[in-house]
Amino acid sequence: MNSSMIIIGVTLAFAMYLGIRARKGRDMRLEQWAVAERNFGSLIMFVLMAGEMFSTFVFLGASGGAYRMGGPTIYVFCALTYVIPFWILPPIWRYAKKHNLITQSDFFAKKYKSKSLGLLVAIIGVISIIPYIVLQLKGFQIIVSEASYGMIPPKIAVWIGLIAVTVFVYISGIHGSAWTAVLKDILMLTVILFLGFYLPNHYYGGIQPMFETLDKAKPGFLLMPDKGLSISWYVSICLTIALGQYMWPHCFGASLSSKSETALRKNTAILPLYQIVLVFILFIGFTAVLQIPNLQGTASDLALFKIAKQSLPPWFIGVVGSAGLLAALIPCSLLILTAATLISKNIYKEFKPNTSDKKLAKLTRLFVPIIALVSLFFTFFGGNTMIALLTMAYSFVLQLFPPLAFSLMKKNPVSKIGASVGMIVGVGIVAYQTLEGTTMATMFPSAPHFIQDLDIGIIAITINTIIMLAVSLFTTKVSVIQEEPIKQASNL
């Protein structure tokens, strides 16, 4: 057993300890288990939301994207992702608190006075969550296998990690996710900042020399191309990410655990500071381009580990692996928790409306290991198609944004039937586009490049919105009471 394995094992054990201990002194009723009785302050909300959003993508995807794509990788700095929740999350939280709502599905069902619409949202949410969990687990097994120098078999690693997550989610709910997220953030910041400074200096004598050398070796690599991953692609992908990020059920649900709308605004205002870390992740990927050449396809996602293992001792690789495994497990815990809550509260109870709150709480926790096992099955037997499914899932949850945005208006022009039909059509278009491999270029072969380069998700949400409004013209609108006006930023 090498030093790397020992550090990884100790970190996992400590994370499990924190996750279980988070329950101490709390009666785990469903509201406490799922949204902490809306009692998280600004600091916990910060690490919790960062725990959701900065996952294995940071360790594998962002550094691999910099290695593979070059300049266009700056899409990871989409600031619009935090502008939109600054305005929509406070009224959502206020409405949820007033009506004691716990899930995203609860919100839609109450806003549109339609349990069937809530059921549809829950089904879309669960279908979208499973491939997201699987991708985190696939990333987890890669990280642990690389960090242990192949001594921990990938399948064993996933079993151990998933058991740990299942135990502390079952026992502590969202409290376990929040406290382990604190450990994850400390490790991630330490590792990424160190590697981002050290590697360019070690190989090139500094960050500026690294860019100068890379630009000479690969002219144009650091620029946005005129076509393909162009400016229009960048704008459209940023818009897609910004509108869809908080439509993920686990992001939406975690926001309801805040103790106030002010804490939510503070969180969205300061969370972009976390993106500074991503700059150093890109530095790592750019450093690896010339030092670890010829990584093709998905192998490019190993750029961070390849160059770190080439440059640093095993004990530090153990620290890197520990940060990476937590970057996978914390989002997993929130995803499993959210899926279990949706299945019990918004799907099971829809068919068994007389289920008591006490029984519902037990059922929700029972679904935790079931979802974990289902995700484990797809991790081992789902193949690479799960990546395509995740892309499809992101566009699935994106279809929830139009009816949600309209529901926050003083006079909502959308009916429950319009909202349902729009979402179903949008999801159907996304499924067809993904499975058939359709792009804007294949749909409009004669169009200018700025049209062909647009992200295909824009088409689905546009058609969704048009159909939703058209159907709503001929169906009964929902009478809603406008919540208090959104407070201005000066209340921070």
Image (cartoon, rainbow, N blue to C red):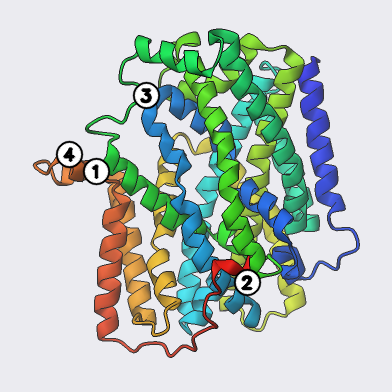
Disc 1 residue type (three-letter): Thr
- Circle 1 residue: 439
Disc 2 element:
helix
Judging by the rendered image, the residue that carries numbered circle 2 is 345
| Secondary-structure class at tag 4 | helix
Q: Nearer the viewer, mark 1 or mark 3?
A: 3
Q: Residue 189 appears at what percent x and percent y?
A: 68, 34
* Quadrant of the drawing holding the C terminus: bottom right
Q: Calculate the distance from the C-alpha at mark 1 to the C-alpha at mark 3.
A: 25 Å
For the point 91% across and 63% down, the residue is 25
Which is in the foreground here, disc 2 or disc 4? 4
Q: Is residue 398 above or below residue 405?
A: above
Pointer 4 or 3: first along the chain: 3
Local packing at callout 1 (Cα closer than 10 Å; few below 14, some 14-19, many 20+) is some
Which residue is tagged 3? 222
Q: Nearer the viewer, mark 4 or mark 3?
A: 3
The quarter of the displayed image where residue 419 is located: bottom left
Q: Residues within 10 Å of mark 2 (few under 14, many from 20)?
A: many
In the rendering, at what x and y percent does residue 225 appear?
A: 27, 29
